[in-house]
Image (spheres, rainbow, N blue to C red):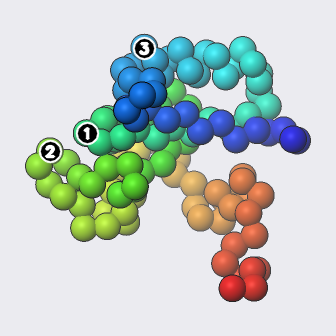
Amino acid sequence: MKPPLFVQTIFGILGGIGAEHRNLTFMRETADHLFGDDYVWSVLAAGRHQMPFVTAAAVMGGNVRVGLEDSLYLGKGKLARNSGEQVAKIRRILEELSLEVASPGEVRAMLALKGADQVGF
């Protein structure tokens, strides 16, 4: 594998590491120790932890992932209609904190992805 490595840390999944902030810090410090500057860090959290946890990860310099595959809710007791609603919410939160949000093109470049216009399906 060629650096930068993409490291996706997952929290709050049954049988996995808990969605606690000390675990988030531990995973970030471990990745720093193992990979130095040669990785891109991304975080997701399951269920009710999704929004607050990925917000904390973004403040720590991480990238975030949200979507219905990780949580069905937009907020306490409010079902999300789709993943786009969750993406819009985390975008608003991060922009309010003056954090930069990557464009789809920037993400494709960061992850070395082609884009839908360059695949044969």
Badge 1 crowding class, 10 Å Cα cut-off, few under 14, some 14 to 19, many 20 or more, is: some
Which quadrant would residue 115 be assigned to in this image? Answer: bottom right
Residue 29 percent across, percent down from the top left? 61, 15
Residue 15 percent across, percent down from the top left? 42, 28
Work out which quarter of the rendered image holds the N terminus and state it.
top right
Of helix, strand and loop, which one carries label 1?
Answer: helix
Of helix, strand and loop, which one carries label 2?
Answer: loop
Of helix, strand and loop, which one carries label 3?
Answer: helix
* C-alpha gap between disc 2 and disc 3: 23 Å
Q: Is residue 107 above or below residue 24?
A: below
**Whether label 1 touches label 2, CB < 8 Å:** yes
The label on residue 22 is 3
As shown in the figure, which amino acid type bears the numbered disc 1? Answer: Arg
Task: Name the N-terminal-most of marks 2 and 3.
Answer: 3
Please give the name of the residue rendered at 42% of the width and 14% of the height, measured from the top-left corner. 22
Q: Is residue 61 above or below residue 117?
A: above
Which quadrant would residue 36 be assigned to in this image? Answer: top right
Please give the name of the residue rendered at 76% of the width and 80% of the height, measured from the top-left corner. 118
As shown in the figure, which amino acid type bears the numbered disc 3? Answer: Arg
The label on residue 76 is 2
**Whether label 2 touches label 3, CB < 8 Å:** no
The label on residue 48 is 1
Q: Is residue 100 left or right of residue 45?
A: right
Work out which quarter of the rendered image holds the C terminus and state it.
bottom right
As shown in the figure, which amino acid type bears the numbered disc 2? Answer: Lys
Task: Name the N-terminal-most of marks 3 and 1.
Answer: 3
Please give the name of the residue rendered at 65% of the width and 36% of the height, measured from the top-left corner. 7
Identify which residue, 26 or 47, lies in the foreground: 47
Task: Name the N-terminal-most of marks 1 and 2.
Answer: 1
